[in-house]
């Protein structure tokens, strides 16, 4: 797909992804869940060159979370993106982009070892822990619970 339009709840911010397929992933890390009231569902458009801030860029508030930036709409509070400036890499709230989520392929769960036990997504897909090591689907709940607070 080309020139996929997305917008926040109030419509002040409009973002266009120049080129993308339908890959969607989730992140179960503490900060994503705290900011989004649960695991954020994201798309991975990659470099800045693939992203156009078409409207309302001045309405975006940036929160610096260590080396990355988390952007949200200052009017309605919608989560917009996660951005690593050093790596020139954007990930964005998938739910901004109606065209993508209509036919999304949900293929990856990140920080699976940080997922609380009270929810789970149905179905099987690739799961990575905080060290980006793959967690086998048969290895039921993450075994390494005592390492939860390790750096
Ligand atoms: Zn908004
Ligand atoms: Zn996260």
Image: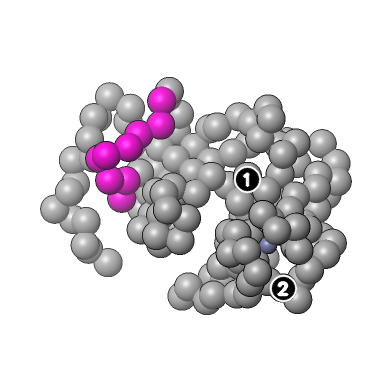
Residue at horizontal 43 percent and vertical 23 percent from the top: 123
Tell me the quadrant of ligand 1.
Answer: bottom right
Cβ at disc 2 under 8 Å from ligand 1: yes
Place residue 31 in its image quadrant.
bottom left
The answer to whether one can see residue 112 in this image is: yes
Position of the C terminus, as image quadrant, is bottom left
- Gap in angstroms between the C-alphas marked 2 and 1: 19 Å
Residue 3, horizontal then vertical, whole percent:
86, 46
- Disc 2: CA contacts within 10 A as few (<14), some (14-19) or many (>=20): some
Residue at 62% from the left image edge and 45% from the top image edge:
94
Does 61 sit left or right of 98 as displayed? left
Among numbered discs 2 and 1, the one appearing first in the sequence: 2
The stretch of residues the image draws in magenta is 114-122
Mark 1 closeness class: few <14, some 14–19, many ≥20 residues within 10 Å = many
Find disc 1 in the rendering and name its residue.
94
- Residue 127 vs residue 75, the one in the foreground: 75
Where is 62 relative to 130, above or below? Answer: below
Q: Position of residue 20 (x, y in %)?
A: 75, 41
Instruction: Tell which of 124 and 117 is nearer to you.
Output: 117
Magenta span includes 115: yes
Q: Quadrant of residue 23?
A: top right
Element on which disc 2 rests: helix
The residue closer to the viewer here, 65 or 130, is 65
> Which numbered disc, 2 or 1, marks the residue closer to the eye?
2
Q: Residue 147 location in percent, x, y? A: 18, 56
Most common secondary structure along the magenta stretch = loop
Asked if residue 44 is positioned above or below residue 99 in the image, the reply reads below
Q: Residue 24 placed where, x, y %?
A: 59, 39
Q: Is mark 1 within 8 Å of ligand 2?
A: no
- Residue wearing tag 2: 59
């Amino acid at each position: 797909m080309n020139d996929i339009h997305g917008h926040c709840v109030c419509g002040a911010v409009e973002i266009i992804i120049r080129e993308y397929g339908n890959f969607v992933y989730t992140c179960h890390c503490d900060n994503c869940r705290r900011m989004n009231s649960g695991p954020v569902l994201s798309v991975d458009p990659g470099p800045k060159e693939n992203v156009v801030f078409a409207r309302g860029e001045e309405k975006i508030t940036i929160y610096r979370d260590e080396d990355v930036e988390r952007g949200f709409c200052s009017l309605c509070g919608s989560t917009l993106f996660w951005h690593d400036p050093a790596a020139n890499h954007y990930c964005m709230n998938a739910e901004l982009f109606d065209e993508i989520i209509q036919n999304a392929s949900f293929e990856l769960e990140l920080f699976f070892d940080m997922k609380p036990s009270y929810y789970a997504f149905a179905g099987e897909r690739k799961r990575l822990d905080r060290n980006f090591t793959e967690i086998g689907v048969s290895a039921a709940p993450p075994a390494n619970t005592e390492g939860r607070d390790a750096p």
